Amino acid sequence: MSVSAIRRLILIGLLISIGAALSVANPSFLTLDNLMTMLQEASLTGIVAIGFTLVLITAGIDMSIGAVIAITSMICVNFISYTSLPAYIFIPIALAMGCLIGWFNGFFITYFKLPEFIVTLATRGILTGLALIAAVKDSQGFVKNVFIQDELFLSFGETVGPVYIVVIVFFVLALATQFFIKRTRAGSNVYATGANPTAARLTGIDTDRTLIGVYMFSGFCAALASIFLCARMMTAMPEFGIGSEMDVIASVVIGGTPFTGGIGDIWGTVIGTLFLALIKNGILKLGLSPYIQPIVIGGIIVVTVVLDVWYKGFAEQRVAKLARQKQMPTREGV
């Protein structure tokens, strides 16, 4: 059994065990409303995490995802406040803006050979400022809390039966992205670029184009999550999404995609997202302070990374030992 399969089984086992413990500690945990709310929270983070997974597979990082959510939410609320355009016109514009921001990140990373962290962190700062500038303000210049009344836009926050639309979109997007990275040549290029970019170039893979495409997809996913977040909250504020990077990184890393690149998949990210949502929901259901959430999430990231590093070293030592054992009979024969 592969390491990724073992990891998933452990995560699923923890999901079941923690869920059972929470249901005993607080019977309201297993109610349909709570489970659907938890899935909705997981899906909002998970949509962004799907795009981030591809970035991490290429051994990159995207620190601008939270700011993309902020700026695209401001784009939507400005269209709603100052124009009479229908949602089916300005929503594609907001999604295109997410792709454009991703292209900007990918272009500077590939063309100028700049570190991914620096480029996306700079983009984060720029977009955070632009979101504040673009925010709808009152006569005194203070940010105004706009109540969204566009029925078509708000329909993105509704349900199909008991299931929120965002949950359906999350799993459909996960399925499509998993198929892409596992069953298409372009998806194989993503893995090759992350595992060994030099070797990938020598085999004819356009690694620059792959990286730009990956960052564009990450921007698209963040913009898509912004639409559902604004529809759910029925408003948009310039701080939407800021600081959400921690949850996204935790979901992807817990799911088995390391920072070293070349490894990972979407199903792991889905399980990691559900696990993180369970932890956050459990903290609230147990009546613990929500302020410990970032402490717990940070601790989970540290433990996961330490285990990944330990296992990588263990695997390398095991491979080296097996190689030495295979060479011993040859030397004895000589």
Image (spheres, rainbow, N blue to C red):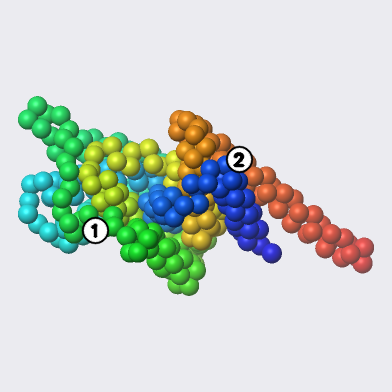
Classify the position of the C terminus by image quarter: bottom right
Q: Is residue 133 visible?
A: no
Q: Residue at the location (24% across, 39% down)?
A: 237
Q: Nearer the viewer, residue 180 or 261?
A: 180
In the displayed structure image, the side of residue 10 where residue 292 appears, left or right: left
Q: Earlier in the sequence, mark 1 or mark 2?
A: 1
Mark 1, mark 2: which one is toward the viewer? 1
Give the residue displayed 56% in from the left and 48% down from the top.
23
Q: Which sits in the foreground, 247 or 183?
A: 247
Q: Secondary structure at mark 1?
A: helix
Query: Residue 250 location, x and y as percent?
Result: 49, 45
Q: Which residue is mark 2?
A: 303
- The residue labelled by disc 1 is 155
Q: Nearer the viewer, residue 34 or 11?
A: 34
Q: Is residue 185 left or right of residue 84?
A: right
- At horizontal 39% and vertical 41% (from top left) the residue drawn is 244
The outermost residue toward the top is 140
Check the image and report above or below for 146 versus 212.
Answer: above
Q: Nearer the viewer, residue 260 or 292?
A: 292
User: Which image quarter: residue 118?
Assistant: top left
Identify the amino acid type marked 2.
Answer: Val
Q: Residues within 10 Å of mark 2 (few under 14, many from 20)?
A: few
Residue at (87, 60) in percent of width and height:
328
Q: Quadrant of the N terminus?
A: bottom right
Total labels drawn: 2
Residue 241 visible to an observer of this rendering: yes
Residue 273 picture location, percent across and down: 48, 51
Which residue type does callout 1 highlight?
Ser
Q: Secondary structure at mark 2?
A: helix
- Residue 89 sits in quarter: bottom left
Tags 1 and 2 touching, CB below 8 Å: no
